[in-house]
């Protein structure tokens, strides 16, 4: 199987010096994680002397210290050093899913040329951490596949148009399920479709450490002085957020920052962690990664969708084998807020989503009702 890797690298240049590359940024990231320059050197595999050379070069270029040392207290980043680390993590959060998706697509195109009869699993799904783990697991099992991250609506449209074999989508559990099914229903209304269970996950509000603005619910987003960062239009999380606002009778215009958005949960977390917003909507994993507070608001199920005649295909069977493995289920269970939900079970749409069956029945009654 052809695998393409696209790296993420950036540099910073000040008028008075040469460009600073990833080595010094990586070192500062490890200092923050490890709490000392000595431990960071061990993790990075560099000498203490070389590390200080990098630090001094950075400070010469930037004109300010990036690191402070205290006897008995290890190392600490200065405001500038912390900002460099934040910049790196925000770049990673925003671009890594895009680069992973692009690498997968490019690899799939090359595979089609070099393999006489290439058989690949085409997976289109909104970005999620269980899907991200699935991508890694499929690579480990040498399952030829193409992963494309996109919004839920786009993924389902790709499946309908035959542009992918499996599409990912998520549906809230409880009061907002009906609204989502009414929105997605036409794309699911095909008796030939089959749902593959993946996981449940928590959605909620990510806030700054200590939650200084006291954001505990959607009502708090409408208060003066609270800044919000949204997800992009077309994403399942954005649609869920809109439904939740509607249920609380909160107008989008009352939420400062409603029109500003990021394309992944991790990018939302990085935006909040930077201090540019007080809260953002997303799953729990990146909130923990960025050391943010997390206020759970909604449980939802994440599913994979395919056509019945594809369930028996070798690539889909390999997918199911990975999903049903104890190793993969344990990995998903280790994600904050995630839980395997009869993972790898194949059902009809109505079996997996009782609310969908009610939507079908309601639509049928409307169709035969006298005018």
Image: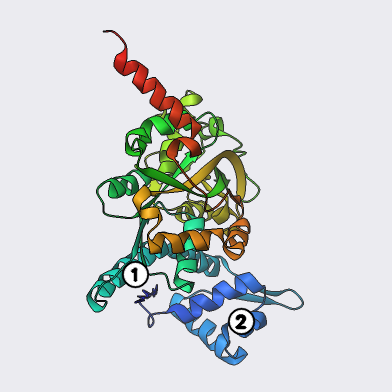
Looking at the picture, how far across and down is residue 164, in whole percent? Answer: 31, 55
- Crowding around mark 1 (Cα neighbors within 10 Å: few <14, some 14 to 19, many 20+) is many
Q: Which mark is residue 43?
A: 2
- Residue at horizontal 61 percent and vertical 75 percent from the top: 31
Q: Is residue 307 visible?
A: no
| 68 vs 295: above or below | below
How far is disc 1 from disc 2 in space, using C-alphas? 27 Å
- Crowding around mark 2 (Cα neighbors within 10 Å: few <14, some 14 to 19, many 20+) is few
What secondary structure is found at the residue carrying circle 2?
A: helix
Q: Which mark is residue 103?
A: 1
In this view, the mark in front (1 or 2): 1
- Residue at horizontal 42 percent and vertical 33 percent from the top: 180
Model colouring:
rainbow
The quarter of the image holding the N terminus is bottom left
Looking at the picture, how far across and down is residue 221, in whole percent? Answer: 52, 35
Q: Which mark is residue 291?
A: none
Nearer to the camera, 321 or 106: 321
Q: Can residue 87 be seen in this view?
A: yes
């Amino acid at each position: 199987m052809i695998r393409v890797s696209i790296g993420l690298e950036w540099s910073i240049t000040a008028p008075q010096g040469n460009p600073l590359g990833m080595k010094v940024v990586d070192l500062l990231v490890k200092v923050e994680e490890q709490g000392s320059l000595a431990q960071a050197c061990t993790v990075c595999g560099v000498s203490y002397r070389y590390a200080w050379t990098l630090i001094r070069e950075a400070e010469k270029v930037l004109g300010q210290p990036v690191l402070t040392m205290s006897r008995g207290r290890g190392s600490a980043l200065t405001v500038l050093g912390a900002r460099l680390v934040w910049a790196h993590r925000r770049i990673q959060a925003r671009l890594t899913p895009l680069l992973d998706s692009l690498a997968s697509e490019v690899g799939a195109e090359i595979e089609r040329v070099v393999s006489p009869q290439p058989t690949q699993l085409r997976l289109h799904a909104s970005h999620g951490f269980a899907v991200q783990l699935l991508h890694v697991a499929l690579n480990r099992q040498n399952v030829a596949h193409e992963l494309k991250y996109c919004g839920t609506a786009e993924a389902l449209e790709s499946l309908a148009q035959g542009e992918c074999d499996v599409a990912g989508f998520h549906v809230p559990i409880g009061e907002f399920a009906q609204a989502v099914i009414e929105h997605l229903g036409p794309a699911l209304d095909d008796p030939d479709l089959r749902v593959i269970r993946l996981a449940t996950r928590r959605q909620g509000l990510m806030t700054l450490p200590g939650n200084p603005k006291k954001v505990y619910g959607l009502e708090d987003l409408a208060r003066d002085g609270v800044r919000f960062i949204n997800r992009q239009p077309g994403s399942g999380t954005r649609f869920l957020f809109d439904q939740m606002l509607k249920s609380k009778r909160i107008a989008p215009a009352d939420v400062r920052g409603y029109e500003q958005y990021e394309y992944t949960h991790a990018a939302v977390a990085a935006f909040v962690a930077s201090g540019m917003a007080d809260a953002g909507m997303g799953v729990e994993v990146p909130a923990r990664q960025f050391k943010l507070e997390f206020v759970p608001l909604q449980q939802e199920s994440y599913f994979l969708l395919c056509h019945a005649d594809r369930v028996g295909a070798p690539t889909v069977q390999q997918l199911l084998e990975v999903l049903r493995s104890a190793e993969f289920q344990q990995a998903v269970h280790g994600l904050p807020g995630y839980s395997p939900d009869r993972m790898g079970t194949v059902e009809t749409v109505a079996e997996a989503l009782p609310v969908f069956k009610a939507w079908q029945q309601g639509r049928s009654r409307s169709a035969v009702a006298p005018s």
